[in-house]
Amino acid sequence: MVTLTNKRGLPKSIVSAIELYSSKYHRGDADISMTQLIDAPKIKILKEEYADKLEEDVSEVIWRVFGNAVHKLFEDSDKDKNTILEKRFFGKCNGWTVSGAIDKLKVITELVEGKWEAEQQLLPIKKATIYDYKCVSTWQIFKNTYHPKGYKDEWENQLNGYAWLLRQNGYVVEGARIIALARDWQKSKAWFESEKEGYDPDIDYPDVQIKVIAIRLWSNEKQDEYMRSRVETHQQADQLFHTQKIQVDCTDKEIWKDPSKFAVMKKGKKRALKLFDDREDAQDHAKNFKDTSIEIRPSVARRCASYCNVVNFCEQGRRERNGLQSTHQANA
């Protein structure tokens, strides 16, 4: 288990709450959880390998407790008899057991005609809609450069993974929803954006702090293929690490690393006139102005830099951090 530190001297009540939350999570009798499955294999491997050496400061995980509290509030308030709350489901894939805890499941049981023991009978069919609560930054719930669908790709992967789990347990999944609470939503910004011509709250800055987002459900075949592929990816990485100590690198997307940018800079100005993905495009734009230069904005692995607690045991993480430090020194 990760050791929690309190380097900033936060009140004991806050530390106790975070300790309580951290002790509650368990994937059950499974090889991997859905949260782990959709993430980078190396992170799971290193967390398990160095569990007794990992540290995390309580000041850096406060939003997890906030999210957990919101989950608990909604769970205690939901009295609908047709809902299943915070239940963990299990399924088998390629020799591994996968588990996933679903926040809320709306279930309607219908009788349909079917054949049972050579006789025509009415058979019960459990139709379900998945709901997942998330406390997130506002920029994650409207369409932008990073989220062209209006939500994170990981959410679609996660909820389709849940749909796969439910199918293994006899459910027919009819829908999937994210109930997103934007923790940094600003009423003033929402009003300002809504005054712009062509404003659409479904794709622009949201007009309310809570947004229900319909997540696209894949075909059964695509869900099956995704699960098989992800399990195999984790199994292969696991085998390489435990037999040869090889760490399979995370992808750029998994470490939140964007491509390098080329900034058109004007002499005497600190801010770029414009950023480009391509150097030639930046040079062409610079020709329109006097006293300009092209500055390279290197790509940064934001997760390695600030958000990964296994980075000290990760070869790739150390490379990324060293590269970031070299960039800062060169620009100093």
Image (spheres, rainbow, N blue to C red):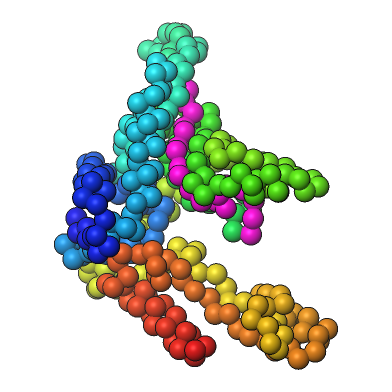
Q: Residue at x 42, y 83 (%)?
A: 325
* For residue 52, above or below residue 109: below
* For residue 139, above or below residue 70: below
Q: Residue 71: tell me if it is visible.
A: yes
On the image, the x and y values in percent for residue 102 come to 38, 35
On the image, the x and y values in percent for residue 64 come to 36, 48
On the image, the x and y values in percent for residue 10 come to 26, 56
User: Which is nearer the eye, 50 or 225?
Assistant: 50
User: Which is nearer the eye, 32 or 66?
Assistant: 66
User: Which is nearer the eye, 91 or 94?
Assistant: 91
User: Which is nearer the eye, 40 or 121?
Assistant: 40
Name the side, left or right, on which 179 lies relative to 240: right
Question: Is 90 inside the magenta-drawn segment?
Answer: no
Q: Which quarter shows the N terminus?
A: bottom left
Highlighted range, magenta = 125-145
Residue farthest toward the right in the current orientation of the protein: 288
Name the side, left or right, on which 286 lies relative to 216: right
Q: Quadrant of residue 275?
A: bottom right
Q: Residue 235: tell me if it is visible.
A: no
